Structure formats: structure tokens, C-alpha cells
Image (tube, helix red, strand yellow):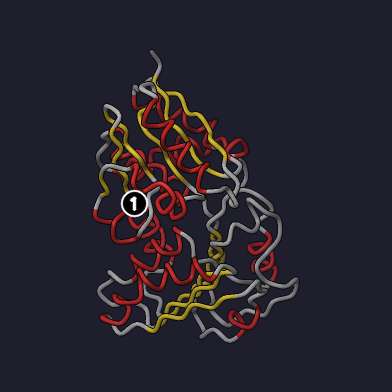
Amino acid sequence: MLSTLWFVGVSTGHSLIHEAFPLWMADLGLDLRLVGRDLPLTAPVEAYRSLMSELIADDGVVGAVITSHKVTLLHAAGDLVDQLDPLAAECGEINAVRREQGRLTGFARDPISVGRVVDEIWPDGTNLLCLGSGGTAIALGSHMLTRTVPPERLVFTDPRPDAGRHLRSVLGPRATARRVRLEVHHGDGTWDHLVRDAPAGTLVINATGLGKDRPGSPLSPAPSFPPGVVVWDLNYRGDLALLRQAAAAGVTTYDGWRLFCHGWAAALGPILGLADEANRAERFATLAAPLRGPA
């Protein structure tokens, strides 16, 4: 029987993964089918619990890769997960679930994949401004706090006070121990003032979902960027409005393509027993490059 892997997100049908996944599995010599499972960002607790109960009961499913619901899913249905890896327990999120004989093991692989990409594009920065405080933002902050020389300041925003509180509960003690200034701002935005007043050379990250799951930008139509700022949008698809704004202002920009490849390689590692994930991500990127079109 053909085994199945779930892809849990908000608008999974639009993802390039449905075209890339068969190429990757053929390269690995695996016969595995990917099935998208969509939940709205406002899904009730019962929807998450129902999803995880179905996963436990379905012998044809090897596990799940989770994108937009990493924190909420664990909060809503964490008691249905039999074991968490250390990073999942530390960060309070899961983005990969391995199913073995009805037992679930949850993994937080984002700190690894996000860390690999941010170290490529911003290896020596001292100030980080992340618009968004969800699971990927927490993973990013967690990685930054493991650097030999951490940033001087980590700033996060979110319209949801509970998301900001969770981020602070995870990152706050470690930031204090490493003498890193941690700020969490609540509100609906726009966040032009934080970008405008950021120190030169700040890394500005869009982790809001705006520009992918929802159209638009977390900034106003005419934001002001400090000298030497770098803008990284975690999205690789959608209108990518923030990247267009930054590029028009002459700012160095990066989209989420590298994170897409590294993220899937890292998430699939513990589910399928794959090693050497960093090199696997490069292989995934090479195989999927023709699907992407012009960068």
C-alpha cells in the first residue's frame, strides 16, 4: 500500500511542494504520497485534536509536516503526542510528527533550518527586527541565542498578545542570560516606526504571513529603511509585497526559497530517517529549481 505524508497548513494547495515532492521522493527511491490538510488560522481546538486523532488512527500515514500551526497545534493537542524532542519541548512547537504504530513523536526542526539560512544571509549582524511572533519567529530567536556572539537586540511584533507572551516565555530567560535585549510589541501595525528607527544594518524579517496566506505588507506603502538594512521575507510565494517595497528602495532582499528547501529537508529527516539534511536541502533546491521560474 502506498504510504502517505500529511502537509498541514493554511493554503497547502497553492504550495510548490506538490510539484517538488514527487521529484524529491523519486531521487530518494521512496514511494510516498503527499496530502495537504488545511486548517484556518482561526481553527478551534477541536479541529486540531480531530486532526491528530485521525493521524494516530491512520496506519497508512507515516507522519506530518506542519507549517502555519506549529505552536497552536501543540497547545491544542499536545497530550496526544507521546514524545517530544528537546527542541520541541524547549520552543513549545512542533513542525514534524513521526507516526510509528499509532504513537506520535513531535520534532521542532525550524530552529535548525531557519538557523542554517540566517547564518548564510546575515552571519554577523547585531540587531534583528522580526515582524511576527509565531513558531518560525521563536525558532529564529532560539537559534540567534545560540550564536557565539548573539545579537545585541531581538525585537518581535505581533497583533496577538498571547503569541508575544509565549515567545517571551520561551526566549526571555535565555535572552537575559546572554544579555540580549528582548522586545515584544503588540498591535495591528503597520510597523514603519520600528523599521525607520532600527539601527543601520538591522535584519528585518517578515514572519507575519502577509504576502502569502494573506495579501499585503506589514508596512505602509512608503516605508523608510535605515542604511545597510537587510530584508528577508520567509515567504517564497504570494505577492511578496514587502520585498517589492524594499527592492524599490534599493535594499538588499532575500525571499523564502532557501528556507523552503532547508525546512522540508529538516522536517523530513526524522520522519523518514534521512541523514545529512544540509546537503539534502541543496539537492532538493537543485531538483526543484526548474519549477520555481525566475527568482
Q: Position of residue 137 (x, y in %)?
A: 45, 64
Q: Position of residue 21 (x, y in %)?
A: 47, 31
Q: Is residue 170 left or right of residue 196?
A: left
In terms of depth relative to the viewer, which is nearer, 163 or 31?
Answer: 163
Report the residue marked by disc 1: 108
Is residue 182 something one can see in this rendering? Answer: yes
Question: Furthest-front residue in view?
Answer: 46
Q: Position of residue 142 (x, y in %)?
A: 34, 66
Hey, what amino acid is under mark 1?
Ala
In terms of depth relative to the viewer, which is nearer, 38 or 20?
Answer: 38
Residue ID at (26%, 34%) = 273
How crowded pointer 1 is (Cα within 10 Å; few <14, some 14-19, many 20+) is rated as many
In terms of depth relative to the viewer, which is nearer, 75 or 288?
Answer: 75
Helix, strand, or loop for circle 1? loop
Vertical side of 195 occupied by 208: above or below: above
State which quarter of the image contains the N terminus: top left
Residue ID at (57%, 39%) = 38
Q: Position of residue 60 (x, y in %)?
A: 38, 21
Q: Quadrant of residue 223?
A: bottom right
Q: Quadrant of residue 180?
A: bottom left
Is residue 230 something one can see in this rendering? Answer: no
Residue ID at (53%, 33%) = 36
Vertical side of 212 occupied by 227: above or below: below
